[in-house]
Image (spheres, coloured by chain):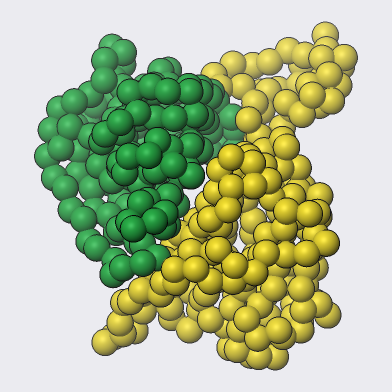
Amino acid sequence: MSNLRFIDKTSASSVSSISLTDCFSADFDVYKIHVVMDGTTTNKDIRLQYINSSGAIDTTANYSIGAMFMSSYTNFIELRYNSQSSHLVTGYNYDGGTGIEYTIFNPYSSSLYTGLISQSSGAYNSSGVKMVGTTAVGLHLGKTSMTGINIIPSASTLKDIEVKVYGIAVT
Amino acid sequence: MPYIGEQVNNVKANKGLYTPNEILQLEKDGNWGGSLELIAEQNCSGNTTLEFTSIKEDIYDTHFIEFIGLESGSNMYNEIRVSNDGGTSYETSNYDRSVQYMSANDGGTFGENRFDGTDRFSLLAFSTAGSPLSNNVYLHNLGNPNLYTHLTSRSTPALTWVYFGSQMYLVAETINALQILNNASATWTAGKVRLFGIKQ
């Protein structure tokens, strides 16, 4: 029996954001989130926000991330963003789609920062469709109990997206 | 009604009470137990390639592959090719790759390995003769005929190097078989490969 426990999922065909509420609780400290999606013909990065225990999307300037833009066609690029209203650049997306896996640590805790590790592979248009991956580490410096997530694109919309949340059981 | 302890798929930490019939039905529906389903496991010893030809791509949109302690008598790294015809043939073009490597040695370097259009997914993380090599791999959208296949991977340290990265097969089609191979065409002497589906 695996320790990966399905919690919830949601999907949408064309939206400006997609949320899953009440997926974090005191039952798990570590979560896996898998995202698969198609893409519109606009280059965009995929961003992650948390939803607090009041059900509101947290847009405080508490999101930090260090990421590597890893493309197949040009040199890798270091990306650093502090004091943002979301975790930027957790994936790139274009027509052809993207797959992302997030690992989130201690989101429900009100005494610890919420940690993030993510890895993605996505389509990106640069004189033709290429592959752009990201590997990122992030921290939300709010010490706020979070109960859900909200995923947004930097431009255009999210097309045919599915989000699934799992808890890592300690048993 | 028997008490069987905590129901393992529950989100909340309640104490489940289930009848035997309910348990049987949950098991039949695939909802009893964890969310990582072992689809197949193969031993590497004595083989130069492995093929997974029943991968349940119509059920799972995310797969997970564990490469566990693969060894050979050669320097090698592990690779994957995809098939759109159930394993009759394997695709040899349209793979993009970007992999970062990091050295744990004093004075060691970090660097990038990338290819724009190559003939397979290369997980890298070199293994010398007789030393084991392990990788974790996620594959997304294998069964979706409208999307490319996306891969992310991480390796355990090998020769003090760690590799992680992203790859993509740039043909929108259904992938229904996977081939595991290594760059040296070496015969493995140890190790196993496990293919999982992430339940949804």
Q: Position of residue A170 (x, y in %)?
A: 55, 39
Figure quadrant of the C terminus of chain B? top right
Residue found at the far top of this picture: B1
Q: Would you place residue B168 above or below residue B6 in this image?
A: below
> In this view of the protein, can residue B43 be seen by the observer?
yes
Frontmost residue, A116 versus B182 = B182
Q: Residue at x 31, y 68 (%)?
A: A74
> In this view of the protein, can residue A119 be seen by the observer?
no
Q: Colour of chain B?
A: yellow
Q: Specify the quadrant of the image occupied by residue A140.
A: top left
The chain in green: A
Q: Residue at x 83, y 19 (%)?
A: B25
> How many marks overall?
0
Q: Residue at x 37, y 51 (%)?
A: A124
Q: Would you place residue A8 above or below residue B156 in this image?
A: above
Q: Position of residue B91 (x, y in %)?
A: 67, 64
Q: Would you place residue B187 above or below residue A109 in this image?
A: below
Q: Position of residue A70 (x, y in %)?
A: 34, 61
